[in-house]
Image: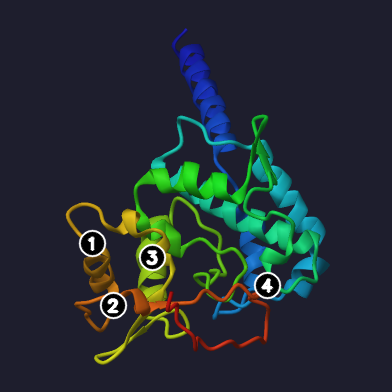
Amino acid sequence: MKPLKTTYFILLLLLFNNIYAQEKVDHSAWDRILILNVQADGMVDYNGVTKDVAVFYDYFRYLCKISPKESWSNQEKLAYWLNVYNATAMKMIIDDYPVESINDLENPWKRKTFKSEGVRYSLDDIEHDILRKFGDPRIHFLLNCGSMSSPRLWNRAYTSANISEALDERTREFINDPQRNQITSSTVKISQVFEWYKEDFDNNNIDVIDFINQYSTVKINKISKDSYITYDWSLNKKDKVTPITSTNNN
């Protein structure tokens, strides 16, 4: 009987491992799409994505079919929803491409594009009702809605293995990126992301200035209402360069 019990235990273990593996998300298709069509500077070859649109749509449908499980780690869930947001924004743009801005689309922030377990989500739903509730303001620098002022779209998929490092790296990159922020000893011009989501950064006994100074190579001590750079909503398409030149003086 002993060998039979051992064999039975091994079979159960293999079955459990197989079920567990099936619950994990495979972002490899998204990874390949991003590697092939997103430059190091975050600019996107939308024509390239449209050529591989069947692969992209397959991945998007896959995301809709596999929803977060209780057994997933917090990192797995966060990586899933970040990829969902970025892929949803990409889908909306590709569906109507060519466009000059995501804001050219009809009601882009409220459109229920993503569906999981019978529930439909808009970009606003994913960002405000799910991702912001993770309580980590660094998520704002991993989200990309296809605009020039958005944080750069990383040319890799987020996974449970790389998400912790990515949160730090993408935040540091964004804050020190002269196309998104201009922070020097004499100038403080920062993204409207810090204005729009101020309450997310004013947390854990720190404020926006403290948060920026954790990552900025140049420390700041003051932010005024004139410090915010007007957001550039034009599409982040390959070979386009739009230097930041205007500020929000309202």
The residue at the point 51 percent across, 50 percent down is 127
Of the pair 90 and 180, the residue shown nearer to us: 180
Q: Nearer the viewer, mark 4 or mark 3?
A: 3
Quarter assignment of residue 21: top right
Quarter assignment of residue 48: bottom right
Label 2: how many Cα within 10 Å (few below 14, some 14–19, many 20+) = some
Label 4: how many Cα within 10 Å (few below 14, some 14–19, many 20+) = some
Q: Which residue is mark 2?
A: 216
Look at the numbered discs 4 and 2 and tell me whether their residues touch, using CB distance below 8 Å: no
Judge left or right: residue 47 versus residue 201: right
Mark 1 secondary-structure assignment: loop
Q: Which mark is residue 207?
A: 1
Look at the numbered discs 4 and 3 and tell me whether their residues touch, using CB distance below 8 Å: no
Residue type at tag 2: Ser
Q: Earlier in the sequence, mark 4 or mark 1?
A: 4
Residue extending farthest bottom? 186
Q: Which mark is residue 13?
A: none
Q: CA distance from mark 1 to mark 3?
A: 12 Å
Q: CA distance from mark 4 to mark 3?
A: 34 Å
Residue type at tag 1: Asp
Mark 4 secondary-structure assignment: helix
Q: CA distance from mark 4 to mark 1?
A: 38 Å
Q: Is residue 173 visible?
A: no
Residue type at tag 3: Glu
Q: Which residue is mark 4?
A: 36
Q: Nearer the viewer, mark 2 or mark 3?
A: 3
Q: Which residue is mark 3?
A: 195
Of the pair 87 and 212, the residue shown nearer to us: 212
Residue type at tag 4: Leu
Q: Earlier in the sequence, mark 2 or mark 3?
A: 3
Q: Position of residue 135 (x, y in %)?
A: 34, 47
